[in-house]
Amino acid sequence: MEQTAKPALRLLSEEQIRFIHDRSLSILSRAGVRVESPGALDILLAADGVRVAPGSPDGGTRVVFDGSVVEWALQAAPPTVQVYDRRGEEAFRVGEDRTRFGVGVTNLYYQDPATDELAPFARDHVAFSTRLAQDLPNFDMVSTIGVLQDYPPETADLYASLELIANTTKPVILLISADDLFEPALDLLESLHPGLSEKPFLVPYLNPVTPLTINKSTAEKLIATVRRGLPVVYQNYSMAGMSTPITGAGTLTLLNAELLAGLVLAQLIRPGTPVILGSLPSFFDMKSLQDFFDPHSMLLNLACAEVMAHYRIPHAGISGCGLGWTADLAAAGQLWTTHLMSLMGKCGMAPFVGGTLGSKAFSPLLTVYSDDVIGQAVRMAAGFRIRDEELDLGTVAEQGPGGSFLTSSLTMRSFRDAYYESELMPRIGLEAWEKKGRPRFEDLLRDRTRDLLRGQRPLDDHDELIARGEAFIEGFR
């Protein structure tokens, strides 16, 4: 006998998944989706099973879908997406791998790890935040970390993208805020890495507009991405009670319908396009006018992942960040809960770790803490093996009652990786804690984060990539 005992979460039954799917098809066939890009509209209407909605009040831009074209798209899309690193090595496969985690999201501010003071996000912040993600072992990718405030909008996204590529070899999830810079950013990165689509380490990230709108920007970015042969993350964002029904089932079904519409468009552009689908299901507080992640957001994240697994479509979901004002108790609790649930469920990617204050500020402090949480959560989700070699029955028989396993051959072979070693939290008892002056974990975390930032070294090809990239951007201007 050889088995691994692994914890697992399951939320939806097969019957419930079919219910969500059938009602999603009903939304697509009755309400349909508004498509704001003429090019995307032409692609959709050229297909069997897509047509202008009867009585469309908005100039014929609202289309409805037959179930047959959705089923065709589900069959056409690949069940896994192979993602590479910048060196051309295989990094991970979304769709058949465990949850993979990434640093980033388009923050507007940088939160100083020593003081928690906020500063407008600048180019230097991208550089050393990306290097921090490069050095932390439990992050599998780096997403666009911030929106530059020290460069004009005409070039800010290009310089941010350049700093991402020059400071990490890990896969990159690329978010471009300026619509007219999306293709120039891809041109820039392809100029630095010709043949990018052959072993893609770059995955553009796109958002439709909820409810039920494929906006012009998203549609045209999707067309450009697919035609370049790159995989894409297509993820929607809800505010339950405002942009989606206030109930969990209503939000899940509407968001799923939007994802299916995006999948159809991607497959019609080029059948077999690798697409990673998912949702960011938040809520809307009518008193404070704030959007936020609720415990039900975590359940909806699991549910979306299970629906995608049923479809055999790779998934990207929430990352457990946003709650909290720094690396505080509120942020820590949400991180632990989200990461464990993702790993024990069917979630594919959690690409946006490190944000505080409603995901408006990037916190190196929270990022370093998150790396430790992810390491422990991955170990927990991996479970443990059950087989004769694990039992040490020979030593049990030899030592008998009151014996010791300290010197057994199994202990000698296994003690180095038998348990998790934290880089942040030393194992000291009361006496040692008193002797060290009663240290606080928050102070140890700040010291560790400052040490990591001070100890950074640029990659071997950093200067060459920066020089070539800046020359490209100057030529673009």
Image (spheres, grey):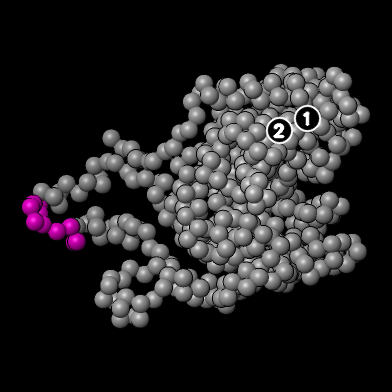
Residue 399, magenta (yes or no): yes
Residue 6, magenta (yes or no): no
Which corner quadrant of the image does residue 360 belong to? bottom right
Q: Residue 84: x and y, percent?
A: 63, 50
Q: Is residue 142 above or below residue 310?
A: below
Seen at 52% across and 76% down, the residue is 451
Pointers 2 and 1 in contact (C-beta within 8 Å) = yes
Residue that lies at the very extreme toward the left in this rendered image = 401
Which residue has dot 2 on it? 258
Q: Earlier in the sequence, mark 2 or mark 1?
A: 1
Can residue 42 be spotted in the picture? no
Q: Residue 54: x and y, percent?
A: 85, 19
Q: Quadrant of the N terminus?
A: top left
| Distance between the alpha carbons at the discs numbered 2 and 1 | 8 Å
Mark 1 Cα within 10 Å, few/some/many (few <14, many 20+)?
many
Q: Amino acid at mark 2?
A: Glu
Seen at 54% across and 67% down, the residue is 365
Q: Is residue 196 above or below residue 61?
A: below
Q: Residue 121: x and y, percent?
A: 71, 67
Which residue has dot 1 on it? 33
Q: What is the span of residues highlighted in magenta in the rendered image?
A: 398-407
